[in-house]
Amino acid sequence: MRSLDLSVDIAGLSLKTPLILASGILGLSGRLLAKISRAEGVGAVTTKSIGLKPRDGYPNPTIILLPYGLINSMGLPNPGAEAFLKELDEAEDLSSPLIASFYGYSVDEIVETARIIAKHPRVSALELNVSCPHVSGVYELGFKPELVAEAVSKVKKIIDKPLFVKLSPNTHLIVDVARAAAEAGADGLTAINTVKALAIDTELFRPILSGVYGGLSGPALKPIALRCVYEIYKEVDIPIVGCGGVSNSLDVVEFILAGASAVALGSVIAFKGVGVFRELAEGLSSYLERKGFRSVREIVGLSHR
Ligand code: RRO
């Protein structure tokens, strides 16, 4: 059992633990998100990304299982912002903050979508996804610091909730994009989305995924994600949510030592189920006790000293 208080404050949100359900993992069902928000060890939950209009996503196959992770190419399936609000009406009894992930194909669409979803009282914060690795229009936005800055500053003018930006690892400009987002008023950064990837069917001589490209997640992603968090923490002074390939509590510790104030869990939930939040919270607590720390805050960015 965990005895240490793992609570963290990040970008104006108070979390019971630094462990967050990553976007895209358990979809958009309000009831399911509320249920996960009550699970032991959960600090916050993030929705699948929502756009202005409904989108079907790609036909199957959309997921490939690898020995070291997953490649997904869901293609942004979502019911659109207005239908999403109705879904959230079902999310009674949330016991952790809900972060609504959203996207748009242009700055105007991003602003319009933010305006709609931010008004729901169950939305505690927004996460702007500029980094889906295989939906063109959304993918490229995250490579352009000036466009991300414009989107962030326009969104911040019309919402009164914290705004995170989820960054793409598929550009050497990740730190520039992070800095641009922070200077434009973002409250936090999520690093990273999946890495653009491909798999080929050797019998049929063609890409396996219907969307051709996918995003690699899972253990193979961890060293890349960790490097991104470390680089961003050096240069940018707003809180970071580390995301990418966490599978055990020492992975969580590594992200925090690299500079993350919270850590999002994705693929590991597909492998281990929601009970992994409790397992990782207990492991984090034991680590802090063993090393003589009293809070998560004390070790954020410690590897930089
Ligand atoms: O829906 C997806 O295929 C997807 C998205 Br929006 C994203 O941001 N990252 C990802 O790996 N897949």
Image: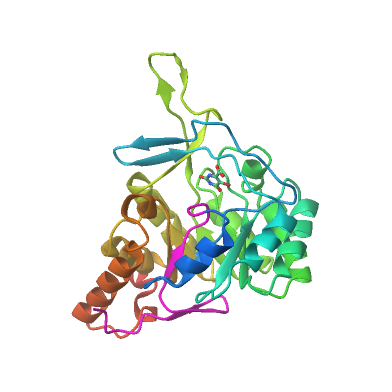
Chief secondary structure of the magenta portion:
loop
Q: Nearer the viewer, residue 177 or 166?
A: 166
Q: Is residue 29 left or right of residue 184?
A: left
Residue name at image x 58 percent, y 79 percent: 12
Q: Is residue 255 left or right of residue 164?
A: left
Q: Is residue 12 left or right of residue 302?
A: right
Regarding residue 294, the answer to whether it shows in the image is yes
Residue 50 drawn at (x, y percent): 65, 53
Residue 270 drawn at (x, y percent): 38, 50
Residue 206 drawn at (x, y percent): 47, 17
Q: Quadrant of residue 102?
A: bottom right
Magenta highlight range: 1-26
Q: Quadrant of the N terminus?
A: bottom left
Say if 12 sits above or below 132 in the image: below
Q: Nearer the viewer, residue 11 or 65?
A: 65
Residue 2 falls within the magenta-colored stretch? yes
Say if 55 sits above or below 126 in the image: above
Q: Quadrant of residue 47?
A: bottom right
Regarding residue 233, the answer to whether it shows in the image is no
Q: Quadrant of residue 137?
A: top right
Residue 208 falls within the magenta-colored stretch? no
Residue name at image x 32 percent, y 69 percent: 278
Q: Is residue 103 left or right of residue 73?
A: right
Q: Quadrant of the C terminus?
A: bottom left
Q: Nearer the viewer, residue 200 or 81?
A: 81
